[in-house]
Amino acid sequence: MTAKTKKIPDYIFESSWEVCNKVGGIYTVLSTRAETLQKMMKDKVFFIGPDFWRDKENPLFVEDNTLFPKWLETLHGEGLNVRTGRWNILGTPIVFLVDFSPFFIRKNEIYTNAWNDYKVDSLHAYGDYDEASMFSYAAAKVVESFYKNELTKKSKVVYQAHEWMTALGALYIQKYVPAIATIFTTHATSIGRSIAGNGKPLYDYMFAYNGDQMAEELNMQSKHSVEKQAAHNVDCFTTVSDITAAECKQLLEKEPDVVLKNGFENDFVPKLPEYNSVRKKARQRILDVASALTGSKMSNDDTIIVGTGGRYEFKNKGLDIFLEAIKRLRDSDLSKNVLAVINVPAWVGNPRQDLIERLDGTDSTQRRLANPVITHYLNNFEDDKILNSLRYHGLNNNPEDKVKVMFVPCYLDGKDGILNMSYYNLMPAYDLNVYPSYYEPWGYTPLESIAFKVPCITTDLAGFGLWANTLKPNGLYSEIEDGVKVVHRTDSNYDEAAEEIKNTILSFAALKVAERNAIRRKARLIADNALWKNFIEDYVKAYDIALANAAKRIKSKK
């Protein structure tokens, strides 16, 4: 079936906790894909997110109350508080931000109906379940109102809900607005993430896990229940990678209809010669900060900068194995100095005053600073896992060490007080990035890395790593010479994986400049394969399946 014969919706609604709310990878999925959708169906794509910014300015949202003014009046009459506007990203799609707080007083009624309609278990709810569910329900009510007041019965409409946080709304649409085709996308199953996060071996015993049983054991019944019911009841169930598809099949007992690979846009990656200028400036800043911190002068020509980063999930993101590999690298025969930079937001306090004084020249001494591995104060110095691991491995930035480590525990927004450059402006500085994830449904950090022409190491437990391997013939693994090194990881090969990462960094550091530059170019070519224009066809397929199944469902009820 070609794209021309597939059913294309007239309108698309997408609901997510991360619309105009920069939390994690789903924000990147939605925000980078928006321009591609806008090109397909201009201003007929509506993103729905939670309104956390009613009393202050949201830099990601530009309010525009001239959008659907009559409908807004109707909404207020229905007790729905919504702001209309544009998402301040490429494509500037229309956004509805929803105030869901009024629905808390109806929580018990909403949960009762969810149980009666779909057997969704809300009895064991705690933490963020109520907040997410009330947003999800409110978002669905907004879509219901828009459909009834602004569209016609002939309109082909798709509602796509992302993650368990929006599952309740997808079920509401399915039940009470049956003309709308529903898609539910799980980016990572709640129970799979919980199994991995609790230190249980997820992969060696995947075949034996029962999702319902594990949800009870880990006190995850409500999140797992709403996610599972959405997967089983929507018109099209999707996920983001083959590895998560296998997880869904086992733990949710439902195989996804389509795998929606996560693409990327490269519009904000600097072009030559600007790229070289940004890279030079970023490298110098990182090396200046590291030199001031450690008291050891690090030169541009003699230092390989190796980075890692992401959410602070010590095991899931592979921070444990990264630090193990860096320790082994320190004990190796290195031809160059290596600076390992850890960009992981932690419970950060203020930027270090002694480091600021060293950087601005107030302190001109060349000694190591106290605690010479971290750029900012932490609120939990004694309990921080990364700092404790650095101490355990003896990674203390001794003057004689050819491997130095710098932990940057803050969001790189350009205003952190030390580096004072944004994450994307710093990215070109790196020679190699390492993301040895244990649990990673897709993995935007390695994709971002190669988009900026920085080769990376990832694993075959990351959806991105599995996809990178598909670019190689005959089932071979992608190697660093290809631009992406994919390391085999299991629940039981920690030592072997750490050694392979160490050896890869060691061999990469020994390459000549021209050889490293050739690998950088290959990395960028892999990134070009992951542009949204190449992956959007998966979404078209999902829209077609959802619309077809919705039509069958409606016909069967007549």
Image (cartoon, rainbow, N blue to C red):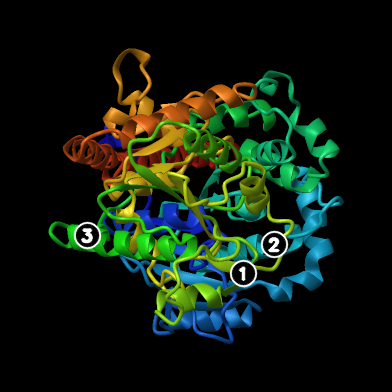
* Helix, strand or loop status at disc 1: strand
Q: Quadrant of the C terminus?
A: top right
Q: Which residue is mark 1?
A: 377
Residues at marks 2 and 1, CA–CA distance in whole angstroms: 8 Å
Residue closest to the eye, 431 or 80: 431
Disc 2 designates what residue? Answer: 381
* Quarter occupied by residue 482: top left
Label 2 or label 3, whichever lies nearer to me, is 2
Q: Position of residue 321 (x, y in %)?
A: 57, 36
- Could you tell me which residue is drawn at 36 percent across and 17 percent down? 476
* Residue 261 pos. (x, y %): 41, 39
Q: Are marks 2 and 3 in contact (CB under 8 Å)?
A: no
- What residue is disc 3 on? 270
Which element type, helix, strand or loop, lies under badge 3? loop
Q: Residues within 10 Å of mark 3 (few under 14, many from 20)?
A: some
Instruction: Residue type at mark 2: give it.
Output: Phe
Q: Furthest residue to the bottom?
A: 55
Q: In the image shown, does 45 or 31 lie closer to the viewer?
A: 31
Q: Gap between marks 2 and 3, in whole Å?
A: 37 Å
